[in-house]
Amino acid sequence: MLALPVEDSKANDRIELIGVGELSGTASDVSGQSDKLENGEPHNRLGGFSALEYSGKEHRYVALPDRGPDDGATGYQCRYQVLDIDVTPGTDHPINLKLVDSVMLVDEQGRPFTGSSSAIEPTKSCAVRLDPEGFRFSDNGNFFVSDEYGPQLIEFTSVGKEVKRFQLPEHLCVANPSESKAEENKTNSTGRSSNKGMEGLAISPDKSTLIGVMQHVLLQDGERNEDGGVPVGVNCRIVQVDIATGDVKEFVYQLDASENGLNEILAVSPNEFLVIERDHYSGAEAKFKKIMKINLEGATEVQDIEKLPAGSLPPSIKPVAKQVLIDFLAPEFKLSVAQLPEKLEGLTLGHTLSDGRQTLLVASDNDFEAEAPSLIYVFALPGQKNFAAR
């Protein structure tokens, strides 16, 4: 368990940004795919990292791409990437990234999952659509993935084959899926807003519970215009699933602003988590890029509440407590405009440094854009006297 500090001047002095590693936006993975996608881009383009997870072994990590280039308009086959991330504080090149492997994701029949938004039903050669956003290892060598399209929670073997799919509450899912975002929002009254499903995933320290975070408010939890557009609101749902029983609990996370969204969640104790909350701007226009520390203890369970208010909650509903841990816009981190992309999406506790400090790694999602590198930020958290070594 980690007793994480609150962000104040003293605590922030103890959190150091060691460096930012880069992978070129034109880099290729090692899937062996030589074909091109519908938009002309190579199928083996490396990028789009939406999750980051430490393997627990030396410097090895997993980076999970989402549904591929062009926001679901191609038949990109879903996969995960294996990286070695070497960290040497105080050197000219403190963060070194090396791609080790590319592993494809397939269903129980061995059919590849696709990022195509039109693949609502499986075919003989292709599984249903998947927009993988969260990745966490189990304690048996398997791993879990959260998906935005459903949303879905799926367990895979170590080689990427589906073994189990969890049943999530109907009020999280849409009854009328569509390849069009606008049509999907318009024809549904409940469930996740289009492309704003289960964006992040955590697993409890004892590996018994999965905790998913919805990127934004559900359709029924926000205010919508007459055309049934994107809902506006601040009350996002955190979904806790017992792995053994499938039992579900839900809690409320209140965004600082309706324009923000949630992108990842990471467990640091049974009740404490780190969450990425960010706006949708990059560079000099960015106003909110923060890692928040939250606590579920004392928060109200809302799985039986069909509709949450778009704004203020009634006294009967207590949201999770939250406070800022890291602000990417803070001057002490000296991040350049180029190092403040729109999408900060991956988050994991990493290996322990030789001086005893715990690392915290954050990954950016470059949307597979050739001109934009994938970035890996490595922070050093307080040493062993304040943090338990992982």
Image: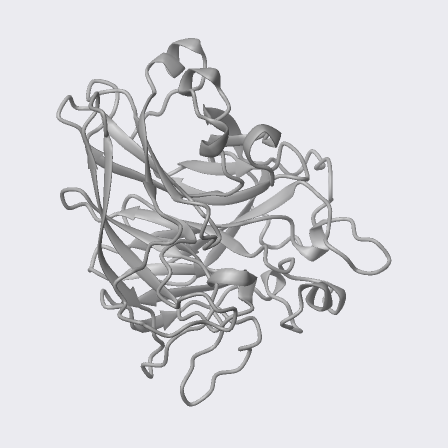
Q: Toward which corner of the image does residue 245 lie, by quadrant?
A: bottom left
Q: Nearer the viewer, residue 320 or 36?
A: 36
Q: Toward which corner of the image does residue 262 lie, by quadrant?
A: top right
Q: Is residue 268 visible?
A: no
Above or below, 15 against 245 in this view is above
Q: Position of residue 91 (x, y in %)?
A: 20, 23
Q: Position of residue 377 (x, y in %)?
A: 35, 34
Q: Position of residue 4 (x, y in %)?
A: 35, 25
Residue 52 horizontal side relative to residue 308, left or right: left
Residue at horizontal 20 percent and vertical 60 percent from the top: 141
Above or below, 234 against 91 in this view is below
Q: Is residue 139 visible?
A: yes
Above or below, 322 against 365 in this view is above
Residue at horizontal 34 percent and vertical 20 percent from the top: 15
Residue 187 horizontal side relative to residue 108, left or right: right
Q: Can you say which quadrant of the picture contains the C terminus?
A: top left
Residue at horizontal 50 percent and vertical 38 percent from the top: 341
Q: In this view, which residue lies farthest toward the bottom? A: 124
